[in-house]
Amino acid sequence: MTENKNKEKNNRTLPGDQLGVIEEYFPGENVVNDNGTLLSAVTGKVNRDEDKHEISVKSTIKTPPKLEKGDIIVGRIDGVRDSICFVDMVRKLGDLDRDLPTSASGTIHISNVSNDYIESMQDQFRIGDIIRARVTDVTKEYVDLSTEGKSLGVVAGYCVKCRSRLQRKGNKLKCPECNHTEKRKISKYYRSKEALRWQKKNKKKKKK
């Protein structure tokens, strides 16, 4: 057991670590040749292919995924105003294991909430709600989102009075603790495995 742990430790490398010399190996992926000395370009695990006499490094750093128009994101409502709400975007659907950049924030305009007429954003979203939304535009300054469609909207909501987890009752949400009933733009995936998985990961991250 100790031997396996030591071997695994020896296979890990940081940017700039010396891996060998050009007389021993050809530089493979994520390895640079610095005047005959082979150096790691990334943090990762070293792979030595003795048959090809090649050394490479597999990166273990999870880079943030790039958002594009049409992507579906999972995020948290961070603020609600009369005609717009702000979203802290956390995950990209299909890539729930990698966090989006910490600066990733989006907005939903009242015209992009639903196909139906909306009078108040307060009836559609509340701070802390977990939502599923589609990216409609991406620039350096902002990301526009939409929750139009049955699959998009709130996937997990909390009571504004006691903060208990709301349960779906038809087209509304009801608190099992205080019986308070609330409106939301509800996704058909409300309380789905996707939403529960995100919440579980987020809670573990906060504990760390």
Image (cartoon, grey):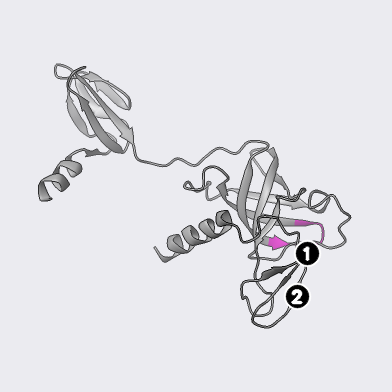
Q: Is residue 186 above or below residue 1?
A: below
Residue 32 is left or right of residue 198, and the answer is left
Callout count: 2
Secondary structure under tag 2 reads strand
Quadrant of image for the C terminus: bottom left
- Find out whether residue 81 is within the magenta segment: yes
In the image, which residues are magenta?
A: 79-84
Q: Earlier in the sequence, mark 1 or mark 2?
A: 1
Secondary structure under tag 1 reads loop
Q: Percent from the top left, x then y, of residue 186?
A: 73, 59
Picture quadrant where residue 26 is located? top left
Q: Is residue 160 above or below residue 192?
A: below
Question: Mark 1 sits on what residue?
Answer: 171
Question: What residue is rendered at 73% in x and 79% in y?
Answer: 180
The answer to whether mark 1 and mark 2 are in CB contact below 8 A is no
Q: Which mark is residue 181?
A: 2
Any part of residue 111 in sight: yes
Any part of residue 143 in sight: no
